[in-house]
Image (cartoon, coloured by chain):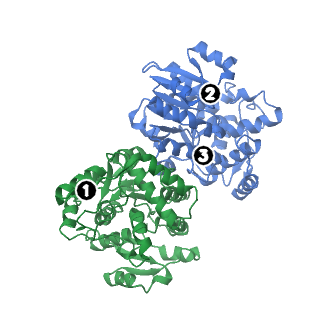
Chain colours: A blue, B green
Amino acid sequence: MKVAIIGATGQTGSVIVQALLESTAPTFEVIALTRPSSLQKPTVLELQRKGVKIVSADLGGPQSALTETLVGVDVVISAIYGGSVMDEIPLINASKTAGVKRYLPCFFATVAAPKGALCLRDMKEDVLNHIKNIYLPFTVVDVGWWYQVNLPKLPSGRIDYAAMETADGIAGDGNVPFALTDVRDIGSYVARIITDSRTLNQMVLAYNEVLSQNQIYDLLERLSGEKLERKYVPAEAIEASIAEIEATSPSPDSMEFVTLAQYQYWYSCCVRGDNTPEYAAYLGYLTTMELYPDFEWRGFKSYVQEVLDGNGKRVYEHLKDLPAASTDKKASAMDTAV
Amino acid sequence: MKVAIIGATGQTGSVIVQALLESTAPTFEVIALTRPSSLQKPTVLELQRKGVKIVSADLGGPQSALTETLVGVDVVISAIYGGSVMDEIPLINASKTAGVKRYLPCFFATVAAPKGALCLRDMKEDVLNHIKNIYLPFTVVDVGWWYQVNLPKLPSGRIDYAAMETADGIAGDGNVPFALTDVRDIGSYVARIITDSRTLNQMVLAYNEVLSQNQIYDLLERLSGEKLERKYVPAEAIEASIAEIEATSPSPDSMEFVTLAQYQYWYSCCVRGDNTPEYAAYLGYLTTMELYPDFEWRGFKSYVQEVLDGNGKRVYEHLKDLPAASTDKKASAMDTAV
């Protein structure tokens, strides 16, 4: 099976590529669609060394070139930056013309209302509607919230090297449950999903566990032996922060937009309670829990222990060269969006 | 089961009410939500005589009053004019607050892409997204195209009394199939759907037959013994007509909007081929054909015979008091939308 992926060097894209390369039954031929200016980047050359076919693709270029690239490709996966999803439209049109059998638009985030809950999700819905308009076979994959962006720091500072809390404190009373996934499991989920006829033209929620912020704090306290400060932020305060940024209509490539997305994820998951298997089922999602009961996902507890043992890894390491002032904010807000 | 309906005197609403009243197992208590100014209309008084509970409801009034009206109601059905669906939002919010167990937004039309194919469908998608945003249990029911608006007139004039062709001729080569339903069957379909747990939070396509325009012309020729002129209209000509009206951005309550909708239905069903069970399945619809294989729907052939025998009935009779110049256009375009 021939799989082309855009965003292969990003956080989500790289775990998908890794899982496809490691799969033995079936095996996958993996093609990284790479913008011409990035062909010589070390991360791209590293992919090539691992066996990925690097193909130059310019989303803003002529569509005939994109179509030619995609002829014979079975599955196209988009894992580009969530704020740039409208750039996918030429790739989607080319996939239709080339006869691609399944297209995975860049979702890979938390479950949320199709419109009105997350600005990033709103744009993804527009992309999905375009796919449906041209009758292109698709699968939407959402993955809940990552373990890796939901671990608060400890007073001792011993897990600062790996922890990256998405939100600044605990929303509301902290008891709203949400779905969580280890970022490293996403690739294996995707490898199963794209070879499964049951998931064609469906939305799928891939997730490992369902926990509330309080449960996460409890677990970390228990395993670390340290006491965490719980800074509860009322829902109204988050609503006010969202309204304040929304009033400025920030552009998707601005820092303000990233901050807005961060607040909205927090509000959607921890106040509205959108990111649950129940709401996903209501919206029509299938879940990996029903589809693949045998899947051996990483537990949240073992992930926490791994971090406490010094074996964790901070996500978005590729963002560490950004100006220091913006790194944390950008990295934490982009969380599941890339 | 307590069912409240808005638009109970319209073409779709009245067949739904009729079916609910006639049902014996289960039985339904039917409530017609009626605007205060219409309470004394003859059609409303006639409903009351038949056993429908008439309740005054003002969609533009205070939401608390709407909520009070809906407490204890199991199912709310909207069958208002397709161009006014955004007026449903207060009713949807009130249904959520009142604890309504299932809400049927005003769809009841052909299957089409969620966005970009039909202006009427675009607005319905916004309504559905609002329902999903507030997590209200729902069922979307689409019904394909009505038999009653797809019968061309005969040269002899003998079926002019009942025929009402939606479109002015045959689109493209006339071979694109689309789903059709007898308007009189819609009520019985809805009665089944709203008591079926499998259809909760789902989209359902209720349809009887799948035919192309050429097949309809063939059948009518065969049964009538008359020869029909086939006026083929190229897809490009319909596209041009749509573009011309779209350029004026007509308001949903204008005659131009109705004409635009008419052209778009024709294009969507007969050129794009949106209105099929296959595309419906792709979009995630369940179909009545799978859900209710025992359902005894009226065949298109027997409907045509009925009309030839002089026993047909023109739909939208309630529009006959409109100024003569606009009646035909308005009636044919509003087809499945009311």
* Spot occupied by residue A318 in the image (x, y as percentages of width and height): 71, 26
* Residue at figure coordinates x 34%, y 63% from the top left: B190
Q: Could you say which disc has been placed on residue A143 in the image?
A: none
Badge 3: chain ID: A
Q: Quadrant of the C terminus of chain A?
A: top right
Q: Is residue B6 shown to the viewer in this render? A: no
Q: Report, in whole angstroms, how far the alpha carbon at label 2 lies from the one at label 3.
A: 24 Å
Question: CA separation, marks 3 and 1?
Answer: 51 Å
Q: Residue B228 carries which label?
A: 1
Res B292 → quadrant: bottom left
The foreground one among A69 and B205 is: A69
Q: What residue type is labelled 1?
A: Leu
Residue A3 is left or right of residue A183, and the answer is left
Q: Nearer the viewer, residue A6 or B132?
A: A6
A104 on left or right of B272? right
In the rendered structure, find residue A121 and report the number of the disc placed on it: 3
Distance between mark 2 and mark 1 Cα atoms: 53 Å
Place of residue A181 in the rendered image (x, y in percent of width and height, measured from the top left): 57, 36
- The kind of residue tagged 3 is Arg
Q: Where is residue B265 in the image (x, y as percent from the top left)?
A: 42, 55
On the image, numbered disc 2 is attached to which residue? A58
A224 vs B144: above or below: above
Judged left or right of residue A132, residue B12 is: left
Tell me the kind of residue under disc 2: Asp
